[in-house]
Image (tube, rainbow, N blue to C red):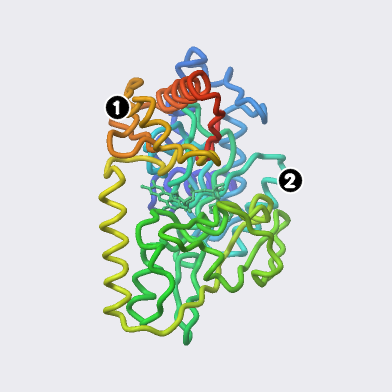
Amino acid sequence: MQNAECRSRVNQGGGRRAEGGDQPGAENGGQRPENGGRAADFRPPGCGLRPPAWAHLADELADRLSRESVIRRNEPLAKHTTLRVGGPAEVYVEPAGERDLALVLRFCRQHELPFLVIGRGSNLLVKDGGFPGVVISLAQPQFTRIEIAGQRLHCGAGARLKRVAVEARRHGLAGLEFLEGIPGSVGGALRMNAGAMGGATFDVVESVRLMDYSGAVRECKVGELAVEYRSCPMLKTHIALSAVWVGWADLPEGIGQRMNQFSRKRWNSQPAARSAGCIFKNPDSIPAGRLIDELGLKGTRVGGALVSAEHGNFIVTDDAASARDVLDLIDLVRGRVRAERGIELKIEVEIVGQ
Ligand SMILES: Cc1cc2nc3c(=O)[nH]c(=O)nc-3n(C[C@H](O)[C@H](O)[C@H](O)COP(=O)(O)OP(=O)(O)OC[C@H]3O[C@@H](n4cnc5c(N)ncnc54)[C@H](O)[C@@H]3O)c2cc1C
């Protein structure tokens, strides 16, 4: 009875029906052809669970969570990333709140399941085999709220950065204009210490609410967190739940003008096509984009992946692209840069999955 009830929740998600689901023939999503189509043979590397085991686990997890949480099987991750490539997640969960998030984490620990927290997927490259575990997205309203108190913005980790910038402008709070064109979430910006136009996330964040992987929650003042260029290492082992950002009073018109100026600058130098932003970290000696341009690599294509003609450090994708195309193009560029300039380009986007 318990399983029957759960099964209907995972498949139909309380009215939010899963794509693929657990129906016969839908097991494994895009991975199935590679193992001859026999579901029982499929064993994701890293956790060794067969599809029926995943189905039971998803049912069991659904049974523990509140009805407001969303849980799906074989969720295509391409639709959760800005590159729009990559395979499915075995289990995809949007916890309704902190209690359910803690339950998901404890469940993963109990069953030794790999898990991954995603924001808006704007710094992620998911491989074509998908993610062999539980993908957690803080997309439910409990995690996307933005509340203003004086000069402070209390923002859930799932809130979009663009919304944070717009709310700050609306309330006459300056200093957050640089967030305007970064297509991520608050959680992703904290993890990456995202920045642009001379501003960076931790310049304007005062405190962060965190959950560790056992489900314990605490507030951290920024001074307690080590912060690096494009990284907050603490968030490799904790989940950001929310953050307090501090602005300073200014006229909304002036803030709006700066946002427009930043936007124009961005769109004059970056492609509008789908991408994951800068693919490579800038070497000390030269910006990666200029290096790639100097080697004549702009416009180089592998399948549906292309080095952008507008910005050498962007790889853009079309409808035919696979994650393999993007990875092969990355290898091609790195190989040419190594051979011709002796520079080892480091990858900025996070590559996940199998
Ligand atoms: C067109 C374009 C332009 C961009 N421009 C910029 C730019 O100007 N400056 C810049 O810094 N970046 C830029 N980026 C990259 C990207 O937008 C940022 O890195 C952004 O902060 C990622 O946020 P996200 O929500 O998409 O995170 P995701 O890509 O979903 O995840 C990135 C990392 O954050 C982790 N994560 C996500 N949420 C949480 C959470 N709640 N707790 C803990 N960890 C979490 C994930 O596990 C992953 O490790 C750009 C990307 C694109 C596509």
120, above or below 143, in the image: above
312, above or below 234, in the image: above
- Seen at 63% across and 25% down, the residue is 45
Quarter holding residue 253: bottom left
* Residue to which mark 2 is pinned: 110
Question: Foreground residue, 165 or 147?
Answer: 165
Residue 267 in the image: x percent, y percent?
27, 51
- Number of numbered discs overlaid on the protein picture: 2
Q: Amino acid at mark 2?
A: Gln
29, above or below 34, in the image: below
127, above or below 251, in the image: above
Quarter holding residue 160: bottom left
* Residue to which mark 1 is pinned: 299
Question: Foreground residue, 61 or 292?
Answer: 292
In primary-sequence order, the first of circles 1 and 2 is: 2
Of the 4 image quadrants, the one containing the C terminus is top right
Q: Amino acid at mark 1?
A: Gly
Residue 127 in the image: x percent, y percent?
49, 30
> Which element is circle 2 on?
helix
Residue 175 in the image: x percent, y percent?
43, 73
> Which element is circle 1 on?
loop
User: Mark 1 near mark 2, Cβ–Cβ under 8 Å?
Assistant: no
Left or right of 100 in this view: 257 = left
- Seen at 56% across and 36% down, the residue is 55
